């Protein structure tokens, strides 16, 4: 679960390396975001080799889709899929992808959402 103040890694080639969650979108007083939810983020650091021609700058505010969430305790439920890190993909104001590639695997849940392009750009799917 992602909440305000959570740090996330960026897994696309937009140029950002780590971001922090500012707001969870959709819902009245919604506190947590899960896989596939949209959040508002602020960029904290950039990738070193992409600084000169990056699409983003440090301190900018963007939207992002939560791709992976860290599972804190083991669960025997097959619906919960846990990763080792919290990750996101950056979006523009019109909810289009900023990057052109997505690194690593993404959950199968994204195939059945409005972010099918993220699933098609990734290297694989995990159910």
Image (cartoon, rainbow, N blue to C red):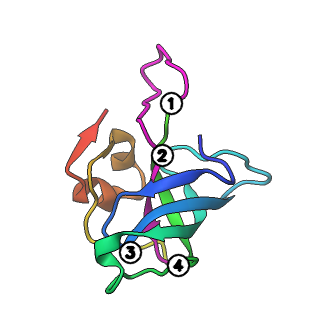
Q: Which residue is mark 1?
A: 71
- Residue in view at x 48 percent, y 68 percent: 45
Q: Secondary structure at mark 1?
A: loop
Determine the residue located farthest toward the front in the rendered image: 48
Circle 3 crowding by C-alpha within 10 Å: few under 14, some 14–19, many from 20: many
Q: CA distance from mark 2 to mark 3?
A: 19 Å
Q: Indicate the position of residue 43 as horizontal and vertical percent values.
A: 53, 70
Q: Which residue is mark 2?
A: 86
Picture quarter with the N terminus: top right
In primary-sequence order, the first of circles 2 and 3 is: 2
Name the front one of labels 2 and 4. Answer: 2
User: In this picture, which residue range is highlighted in magenta?
Assistant: 72-93
Cα separation between marks 4 and 3: 10 Å
- Mark 2: few, some, or many residues within 10 Å (few <14, many ≥20)? many
Which one is closest to the eye, mark 4 or mark 1?
A: 1
- Asked if residue 81 is among those painted magenta in the image, a careful observer would answer yes
Quadrant, the C terminus: top left
* Residue 93 numbered mark, or none: 4
Most common SS among magenta residues: loop
- In the rendered image, residue 32, in percent from the top left (x then y), is placed at 66, 45
């Amino acid at each position: 679960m992602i909440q305000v103040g959570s740090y996330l890694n960026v897994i696309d080639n937009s140029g950002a390396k780590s971001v922090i969650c500012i707001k969870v979108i959709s819902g009245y007083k919604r506190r947590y975001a899960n896989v596939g939810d949209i959040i508002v983020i602020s960029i904290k650091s950039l990738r070193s080799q992409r600084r000169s021609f990056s699409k983003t700058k440090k301190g900018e505010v963007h939207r992002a889709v939560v791709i992976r969430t860290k599972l804190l305790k083991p669960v025997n439920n097959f619906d919960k899929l846990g990763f080792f890190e919290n990750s996101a993909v950056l979006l523009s104001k019109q909810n289009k992808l900023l990057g052109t590639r997505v690194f690593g695997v993404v959950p199968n849940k994204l195939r059945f959402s409005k972010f099918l392009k993220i699933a098609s750009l990734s290297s694989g799917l995990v159910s």
